[in-house]
Image (cartoon, grey):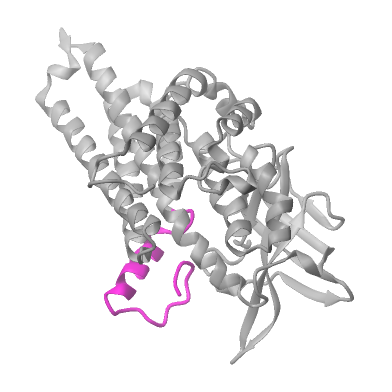
Amino acid sequence: MAPMEAGELGAEHEALRATVERFAREEVAPVIAGYYEHGAFPYPLVQKMGEMGLFGLPFPEEYGGMGGDVFALCLAIEELARVDSSVAATLEAGVGLGAMPIYRFGTETQRRRWLPSLCAGSGLGAFGLTEPGGGSDASGTRTTAVRDGDAWVVNGSKAFITNSGTDITAFVTITAVTGSAGGGRPSISAIVVPTGTPGFTVAPGYSKVGWCASDTHELAFDDCRVPLGNLLGEEGRGYAQFLSVLDEGRIAIAALSVGLAQGCVDECARHLSEREAFGRRLGESQFLQFKLADMDARTHVARLAYYDAARRLSAGRPFKREAAIAKLVASDAAMVNAREATQIFGGYGFMNETPVGRFYKDAKVLEIGEGTSEVLRMVVARHLGFGGASRAAGES
């Protein structure tokens, strides 16, 4: 199912969007502030999302999925992010970084083992790429995996890994150096490490600026042994596989960014209609009307950008450039709209109890995760014929 004309949705996609919008408004919005304030993972909401089939949206029914596409997933992520980014990020990472690598590169045995629980939302997968000293230099992986009999012995660490330490986390797929590719370059492979494997340690959760109801940890591997059969895809192709997954993930993060930007528009429109100052409603101020109009326009353009990238992906057309542009434009829209919304709300916008306060804290990471804005510009520049020597994350 691909989207229709530029901003138009087909009947199935619209029905899904409306269902998730209602769930976000009626079930997420009333409770998420409490989870956010205490840094708690919202297990009941995740369970409900699993029952709705959201974690299985882009996967075939034979694995427990809904038989949809990435565009359907993006619509769900956008609607969740209109209310809360932590819940939206849990879905995005659970599908895009946890389940999608298994589906794209796993053997049939690996798919049958892992995908049914991931599609049901009863299990979560994570992807361990970033390392404490690496940042955007994903090709500079230091974690190693050495063959020893019928096992890989993994040593190293990963940082900022989403969904890696919940009570329902089933595994983390990590990138590790498994040899040399020649020319002084490491051979990087992807290996599935199940939760509870001896030598696999999950550090306490980070104290974060935003996404406070999302699960994020540093991971350590100390002589951690996993079967050779836990190799995901071809040996030495882990880095290339990651880049492929990341390109798709950027569309989903763009959708999340659009949701946050739209949430800012929604909240400000309500605030301007209800709030009075100096004897009149704030909405009577043309200055504030113009601010809101700019926010709405910014959101609309960003939405069209991710729709276009999703349409290309669904149609099997090249989409790397469009995905980078979508995330770049959408994350900027989220950040600017969050700042403007906070200003419009004044002191109330600085309170965590308000959606706007949470939006402001949640927006910044959208310019960092799954490819920084600087890396995205490098990707686009390469498509224009420049910057061919770069080795930063997201380039191939």
Check the image and name the residue furthest to the left. Answer: 286
Say which of 114 and 35 sits in front: 114
- Residue 395 higher or lower than 47, as above or below: below
- As for residue 138 lying within the magenta part, the answer is no
Say which of 110 and 358 sits in front: 110
Residue at x 40%, y 65% (from the top left corner): 375
Residue at x 44%, y 37% (from the top left corner): 76
Say which of 123 and 326 sits in front: 123
Horizontal arrangement in the rendering, residue 280 relative to residue 74 (left or right): left
**Rendered location of residue 66, percent (x, y):** 54, 41
- As for residue 378 lying within the magenta part, the answer is yes
Check the image and name the residue furthest to the top. Answer: 279
**Rendered location of residue 277, percent (x, y):** 20, 12
Q: Quadrant of residue 139?
A: bottom right
Residue at x 32%, y 34% (from the top left corner): 262
Which quadrant does the C terminus fall into?
bottom left
Horizontal arrangement in the rendering, residue 133 relative to residue 68 (left or right): right
| Span of residues in magenta | 368-396
**Rendered location of residue 362, percent (x, y):** 45, 39
Residue at x 48%, y 24% (from the top left corner): 23
Horizontal arrangement in the rendering, residue 145 relative to residue 396 (left or right): right
- Residue 124 higher or lower than 157, as above or below: above
